[in-house]
Amino acid sequence: MGNPKAFLNIPRQEAGYRPVLERVEDYSEVEQTLNTSDRRKQASRCMDCGIPFCHWACPVGNKQPEWQELLYEGRWKEAYHVLSLTCDFPEFTGRICPAPCEKSCVLKLSADSPVTIRENEASIAEAAFREGYVNVKIPVRNGKTVAVIGSGPAGLVVANQLNRKGYTVTVFEKDELPGGLLRFGIPNFKLSKNIVQRRIDLMTAEGVIFKTNTMVGKEILAREVVDNFDAVCVAIGAEVPRDLPVEGRNLKGVHFAMEFLGQQNRMLEGIPVPPKNQISAKGKRVLVIGGGDTGSDCVGTSNRHGAKSILQIEIMPKPPVGHNPETPWPMYPQVLKTSSSHEEGCERRWNLATCRFIGERNVLKAVEVEEVEWIKPAVGGRPEMKMTGKKEVIEVDLVFLAMGFVHPEQEGLIKELELATDARKNIAVDKQLRTANNKIFACGDAITGASLVVRAMASGHKAADAIDAFLKEKKNK
């Protein structure tokens, strides 16, 4: 513990966002950074607790007290070394992780002023790249090959870990560029794509092979993948959005959120999108259905398009600000989250269910919603939703459905890989799907359903360890 009194004398200082009027004019990252001196002061606030709850709460097991002290002491290279031992891509998590570590920081629990762990992590990662601490390291090959299907955060971790262990790794990606959710899901104003490409370039230089525009089971035969590799990891994510099957769903102007966000990212990458397929919010009244991060991303992107108005609705009640007694630690706090996108301009409403979409000549004109109530059961159980009969019609031009994703069904891919007749009978090993022939593993959202990027990364790390153990055991037999 470098400065035992810092947490008493130094207040929490966040870098904050760029001015609203400036940032809505571009897609550059909205978050700013502190200077080196202030960043080290923030790291000094770490109390080096006897039981570091931040470490416990981190899905990848980051050793926050250790690298916070190194950062405070100005030992940036060593701080990055300790950080990279547990986190493959701190430049990603330092930008987009909701920081469960900070929710468990003792300073959060005692004084509602946690250490700026996420921002400190991003600063360490950027300093490492800037100062040349991150170098290409080509491992000695062991003669074994592994195929990874999907290049999102989980797949990239599997590829990175196994490549470093000496395996020749080929990553198959169905989209135009590697990165998955990081590339085509998260807006540039939260995660610049040159940050993603920088890591892809490093992995390529270290020997990872990326094959894009390749859908396993379609463009190439799935059986060939199984036959030509010593192990296969399925990291296809959870990409099927939850639909809203109400009257008027097929009207022109109703879209899934990821159609909008993915298309915008492609256009910024210079990937052609036919004009007739382009979704533009310019001058339109936009309704976002769903109150999570994806909905927030639609708000931010619509603001940058120049939407006339933006309304975001949520079927659940409005959560409390700051502290929620119903979700005490160690539960993740369900509190009101106001993102940078909300600050840029957005009306928000809660307890609203969508009844139907109203159109004219097959074009969306309005949405009918109904107020709902949530009734708590007398003894335990989940709250019950009750329709109140209070309906209203909201005039809109564009709707984005951002209600989450359904749990992925892997049976189709498993059957194409000809591994098992019933995927539900597969053996789970450390939460990794491992089929009857033991050669196939899975990780990330493909097995858990949609979750946090950092949890997908943790799952990818476990999958890589399981594949390594399997292939070493197979070699020794």
Image (tube, rainbow, N blue to C red):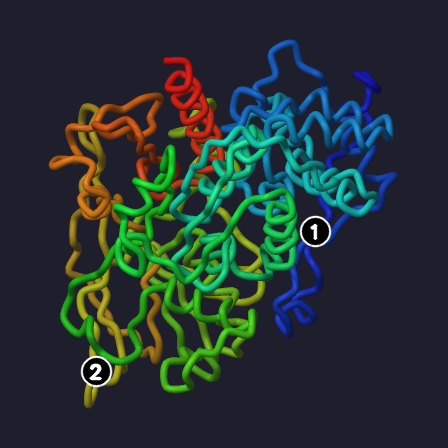
Q: Is residue 415 above or below residue 363?
A: above
Toward which corner of the image does residue 273 lie, by quadrant? bottom left
Q: Position of residue 280 (x, y in %)?
A: 44, 80
Toward which corner of the image does residue 68 lie, by quadrant? top right
Question: Dot 1 surroundings within 10 Å: few (below 14), some, or many (20 or more)?
Answer: few
Left or right of residue 196, residue 432 in this image: left
- Which of 430 and 214 lies nearest the eye of the viewer? 214
Label 2 or label 1, whichever comes before in sequence order: 1
Toward which corner of the image does residue 350 lie, by quadrant? bottom left
Q: Position of residue 58 (x, y in %)?
A: 53, 27
Per the image, label 1 sits on a secondary structure element best described as loop
Please tell me the numbered disc located at residue 16: 1
Q: Quadrant of the C terminus?
A: top left
Q: Farthest residue toward the left?
A: 421
Residue carrying label 2: 359
Mark 2 and mark 1 in contact? Answer it, CB < 8 Å: no
Q: Is residue 3 above or below residue 187?
A: above
